[in-house]
């Protein structure tokens, strides 16, 4: 049995996460974005001695320091990939939809990050690449890369269509991958629902946790 603790939107307050880890003693932790770190993630999680993976949210790029505290941490991002977490295949898609890149229901403005970068003058680049505030946009290339890989779980920052402000494209991604369960953050609202096709969805609240137990693979 694999026991994974999913935690969303700490927004700088990691005490609830540390308490949840101590209480549940999970095999691993997956963070669902909007960490908004005031110090490096490894310092916040210094007493957490289980594997940790993460996806970014839309506020993790609010400053250079927040970006560095997360993206330069020793913990690996799940964004745009499928990785084994406690023996369970977890797919991750961080960030949110932005009209400057891709808003569902409309044709993507840029399919790839390179396409977007080519439309910007070098004066708008940040650290030789996309502007920091564009790095939380969901790009079709990342969505497509996740869609091609098998997984047991899908974690996103944005919500699927069962949430009033969610997107069917994320439900479609879960259905295409035939995952057992999908979890998301972003809206600071805790709920349980089910997608068309029978996939369980957990929305997590502000600094909210959900322990999910999986049978042996």
Image: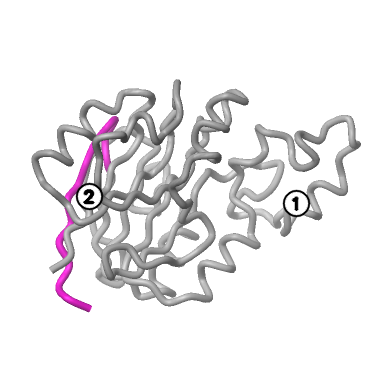
Q: Residues within 10 Å of mark 2 (few under 14, many from 20)?
A: many
Measured as percent of width and height from the top left, residue 38 is found at: 45, 21
Q: CA distance from mark 1 to mark 2?
A: 36 Å
Earlier along the polypeptide chain: callout 1 or callout 2?
A: 2
On the image, numbered disc 2 is attached to which residue? 5
Query: Observer-nearest residue: 108 or 204?
Result: 204
Vertical comparison of 42 with 184: above or below: above
Query: Observer-nearest residue: 57 or 20?
Result: 20
Measured as percent of width and height from the top left, residue 113 is found at: 73, 52
Indicate whether residue 208 is drawn in magenta. yes
On the image, numbered disc 1 is attached to which residue? 109
Q: Does dot 2 land on a helix, a strand or a loop?
A: strand
Which quarter shows the N terminus?
bottom left
Q: Is residue 139 left or right of residue 5?
A: right
Q: Does dot 1 land on a helix, a strand or a loop?
A: loop
Measured as percent of width and height from the top left, residue 149 is found at: 48, 75
How many numbered badges does the structure rendering display? Answer: 2
Q: Nearer the viewer, mark 1 or mark 2?
A: 2
Q: Is residue 150 left or right of residue 13?
A: right
Task: Look at the numbered discs 1 and 2 and tell me whether their residues touch, using CB distance below 8 Å.
Answer: no
Identify the magenta region.
204-217
Q: Which of the numbered marks, if any, corresponds to residue 94?
A: none
Which quarter shows the C terminus?
bottom left
Vertical comparison of 193 with 49: above or below: below
Q: Which residue shows up at 39% across the image and 71% down it?
A: 175
Q: Residues within 10 Å of mark 1 (few under 14, many from 20)?
A: some
Measured as percent of width and height from the top left, residue 169 is found at: 49, 60
Q: Which residue shows up at 57% across the image and 31% down it?
A: 61
């Amino acid at each position: 049995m694999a026991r994974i603790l999913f935690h969303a939107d700490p927004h700088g307050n990691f005490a609830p996460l540390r308490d949840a880890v101590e209480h549940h003693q999970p095999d691993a932790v997956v963070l669902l974005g909007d960490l908004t770190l005031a110090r490096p993630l490894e310092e916040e999680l210094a007493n957490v001695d289980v594997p940790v993976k993460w996806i970014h949210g839309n506020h993790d790029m609010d400053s250079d320091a927040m970006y560095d505290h997360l993206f330069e941490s020793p913990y690996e991002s799940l964004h745009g990939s499928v990785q084994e977490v406690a023996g369970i295949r977890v797919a991750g898609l961080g960030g949110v939809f932005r009209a400057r890149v891709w808003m569902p229901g409309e044709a993507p403005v840029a399919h790839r990050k390179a396409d977007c970068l080519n439309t910007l003058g070098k004066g708008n680049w940040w650290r030789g690449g996309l502007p920091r505030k564009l790095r939380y946009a969901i790009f079709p290339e990342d969505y497509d890369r996740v869609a091609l890989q098998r997984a047991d779980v899908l974690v996103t920052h944005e919500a699927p269509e069962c949430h009033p402000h969610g997107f069917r494209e994320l439900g479609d991604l879960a259905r295409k991958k035939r995952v057992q369960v999908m979890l998301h953050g972003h809206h600071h609202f805790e709920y349980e629902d089910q997608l068309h096709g029978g996939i369980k969805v957990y929305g997590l609240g502000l600094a909210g946790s959900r322990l999910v137990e999986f049978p042996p693979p």
